[in-house]
Image (tube, grey):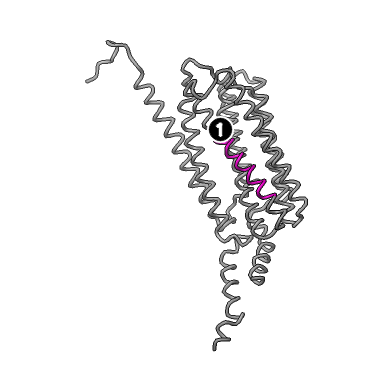
């Protein structure tokens, strides 16, 4: 048993880096980036500096996606090497599902809403 | 014959080979880290469905309050800061754990727990305020979606807090043994994923809600 533990312990130390623990520097870089990427959208919305709401919306969404990538790389340590690349594969697969679920739901329900609006009798357009 | 079969030389190389095969799974976790990651991905799918539901219902006010009238961005900003700070303090705990410093690991874990507690406390304060104003989950589809999405996230953070307390006890009793390191790594992934989900919440629910 102790021999087995010894093996595990040796494995832990020799492979600590490839397993995807960050260094202090990595965490601090990630934190600094996150603070900036959080502060900018809050500032944009709370101060209303940009007159155009559409631009603000797009900027806020873009910053959120950048921050998600920053967290994934610096805090969750997803890379091509961890677990032989399987964490990255699982993440990509999940991302595809998330995009399908969210965009599909919004798309379908938007059309459902606009095509099934309650109408007054007689305003129904003539259909063939 | 029997001594040959049972000798250490026969058994140890097997362990070595197994270990070499999965050498990417550190801390003797075998497939634990990957398995836990798959669980986290399924959790991400739960949040994806809740985000989709919220997205569909977010403009169905039923004559009730709109986001602009009920969301307090300064409070959300403080909450976001709490969760972000808890992420970096958890990172510090991981670094101390790898250096096998028990005291420092416990200290950073406890600080992480306090930030997490502050987050849950502020969120409950916000919910209580909304409900007092009459913006209950029953008021409109928008509010149902809001409370379900944000509440599920808050519930996850609460579970994370319980887990942190459990790990504080475990580390105090057994120290930084291989099993505890593995558990702390899983907890770390869980905690950081909740921060990622929160990015989606403060962006799509609060910031874009106020802009609408």
Residue B44, position as x, y percentages in the image: 52, 42
Q: Quadrant of residue A43?
A: top right
Residue depicted at x 58% and y 40%? B156
Foreground of the two, B122 or A103: B122
Q: Which region of the structure is painted magenta?
A: B149-168
The number of numbered discs placed on residues in the rendered structure image is 1
Query: Label 1: chain?
Result: B
Image position of B192 (left or right of B143): right
Q: Where residue A91 sits: x, y (%)?
A: 53, 47
B17 or B127, nearer to the observer:
B127
* Dominant SS in magenta: helix
Relative side of A123 to B63, left or right: left
Q: Is mark 1 on a helix, strand or loop?
A: helix
Judge whether residue A22 is colored magenta: no
Quadrant (top left, top right, bottom left, bottom right) of the C terminus of chain A: top left
Dot 1 alpha-carbon crowd within 10 angstroms: few under 14, some 14 to 19, many 20 or more? some
Q: Name the residue under label 1.
A: B151
Quadrant into which the N terminus of chain A falls: bottom right
Q: Where is residue A63 in the image (x, y as percent from the top left)?
A: 61, 33
Image coordinates of residue B71 in percent, x first then y, are 60, 22
Please identify the residue farthest to the bottom as the structure is shown: B1
Query: Residue drawn at (38%, 26%), measured in percent from left and top?
Result: A111
């Amino acid at each position: 048993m102790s021999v087995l533990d010894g093996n595990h312990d040796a494995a832990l130390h020799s492979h600590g880096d490839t397993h995807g623990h960050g260094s202090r520097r990595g965490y601090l870089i990630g934190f600094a980036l996150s603070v900036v990427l959080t502060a900018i959208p809050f500032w944009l919305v709370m101060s209303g500096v940009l007159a155009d709401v559409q631009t603000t919306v797009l900027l806020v969404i873009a910053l959120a996606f950048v921050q998600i990538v920053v967290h994934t790389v610096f805090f969750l340590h997803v890379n091509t090497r961890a677990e032989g690349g399987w964490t990255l594969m699982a993440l990509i697969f999940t991302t595809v599902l998330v995009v399908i679920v969210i965009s599909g739901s919004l798309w379908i329900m938007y059309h459902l809403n606009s095509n099934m609006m309650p109408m007054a009798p007689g305003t129904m357009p003539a259909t063939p | 014959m029997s001594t040959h079969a049972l000798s250490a030389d026969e058994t140890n190389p097997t362990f070595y080979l197994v270990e070499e095969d999965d050498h990417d799974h550190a801390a003797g976790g075998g497939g634990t880290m990957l398995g836990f990651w798959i669980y986290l991905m399924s959790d991400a799918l739960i949040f994806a469905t809740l985000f989709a539901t919220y997205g569909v219902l977010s403009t169905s006010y039923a004559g009730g309050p709109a986001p602009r009238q009920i969301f307090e961005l300064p409070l959300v900003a403080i909450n976001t800061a709490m969760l972000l700070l808890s992420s970096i303090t958890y990172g510090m705990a991981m670094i101390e754990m790898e250096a096998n410093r028990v005291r420092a690991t416990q200290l950073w874990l406890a600080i992480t727990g306090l930030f997490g507690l502050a987050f849950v406390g502020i969120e409950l304060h916000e919910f209580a305020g909304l409900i007092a104003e009459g913006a209950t989950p029953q008021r409109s589809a928008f509010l149902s979606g809001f409370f379900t999405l944000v509440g599920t996230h808050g519930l996850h953070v609460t579970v994370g807090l319980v887990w942190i307390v459990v790990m504080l006890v475990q580390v105090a009793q057994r120290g930084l043994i291989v099993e505890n390191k593995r558990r702390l790594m899983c907890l770390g992934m869980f905690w950081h994923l909740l921060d990622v989900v929160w990015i989606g919440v403060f962006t799509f629910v609060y910031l874009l809600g106020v802009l609408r």
